[in-house]
Image: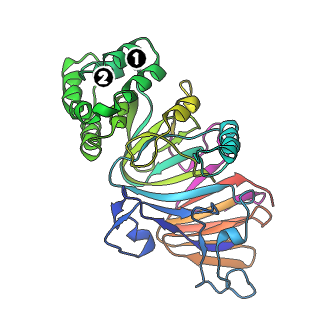
Amino acid sequence: MFSIRGEIKDYDWGIIDGLQPWTGEASGGPQAELWFGVHPSGPSSLDPSVHDKGNDDADSAGTLADRLTREQAPVLAKILAAARPLSVQVHPNSRDAKKMWDDQQIAGPQILADPYEKAEVLVALEPFDAFVGWRPATDAAEIIERIDGLALAASALHSRDPIAAIQAIHEHHSRAADLVAQLPNAIASAQAAGTMSRSMSDAEIAAYHQAASDFPDDIGVLLTPLLDFVTLAPGDAVYLAPGIPHSYVRGIGFEVMTSSDNVLRLGLTNKVVYVDHALKILDFETGPQFMSGSSIAPSGAAFRLEVIRDGSVVLGSGEYRLVVAVEGSMEVSIADDARTTSQGSAIAISAREGDATISAPGLAIAVLAPASA
């Protein structure tokens, strides 16, 4: 097993020093994600402070990617701290990822970071707001039709044609500032009309206001009414299969995904937006899966989670196991090899190693996934 430290990502949407409880580092700037895995965009460092007798790996410098391949460590875990909305985005399935990757090797543009599928689950550590999946089309139309200039988009929604609606919205990118400025009033008017299938919460309305304020010139803000909204309570989780659109709004959570960094964006970003490519991979049939409890095992997912709070569990061999100390320290033992790791650090255990006992007086989250030895 390998004691590792997370790799910090300081994306501009992060909370100021938001990861300090897990890193012990205060930068005075945004801290967005702490990565645990082998992905080449941010492989985790081996912890040089660990010196277990007879364990050469622990005494060596380098990263987890120097010890395990993606096939041996097929998941990426992150602690995520969002101060403002992330991009409206979608991730490819394995077939689409392979095709797009092959195409960009020949003629570009460079859209994907790797040739792999990306599916993910988010577990809220604090209340977490997010746009996930699709709002009922008639409810979305109730908002969009109140924005002067988007009649065609509203009509497409009434006709159950979300692709046409998205295209019609993006066609007005040159008028983005004018249209985005209308969104808060459109939200208030739709709420007051009382004709939507559900009333919008204060947190949801605040999310629209924040998106319009943070991205006043981004036409992608007008896509958020097409998405459903949820506030996850601590311990609640949502699983997003490839193709499900989403935009995390604010909060602190624990995120797990297949080891991929493939993101196709539709808005709320200063990065390149590939609308046509994103539209090809959107899934209008599959919905998010919501769950909670000590075992989080989404249907169809290539991984599962065990939430260990003030207790211990045994994780059997034959799978890759990644265990992160989220609150307080934890102890991981395999036969005579025992490790204690502090909050914000993790232990990675290959499939070929034996049963692992995890003891956590606080909170630890274990990720398990089929892997090669």
The reply to whether the C-beta atoms of the residues labelled 2 and 1 are less than 8 Å apart is yes
Q: Nearer the viewer, residue 193 or 365?
A: 193
* Quadrant for the C terminus in the image: bottom right
- In the rendered image, residue 370, in percent from the top left (x then y), is placed at 74, 52
Above or below, 354 against 256 in this view is below
Q: Which secondary structure lies at badge 1?
A: helix
Q: Quadrant of residue 197?
A: top left
Residue 313 visible? The answer is: no
Q: Which mark is residue 157?
A: 1
- In the rendered image, residue 207, in percent from the top left (x then y), is placed at 29, 41
| Mark 2 crowdedness (10 Å alpha carbons): few <14, some 14-19, many ≥20 | many
Q: Nearer the viewer, residue 278 or 359?
A: 278
User: What range is drawn magenta here?
Assistant: 291-320
Residue 292 visible? The answer is: yes
Name the residue carrying label 2. 144
* C-alpha span from label 2 to label 1: 9 Å
Q: Which mark is residue 238?
A: none
Residue 204 within the magenta-colored segment of the rendering:
no
Q: Nearer the viewer, residue 354 or 221?
A: 221
Above or below, 221 against 235 in this view is above
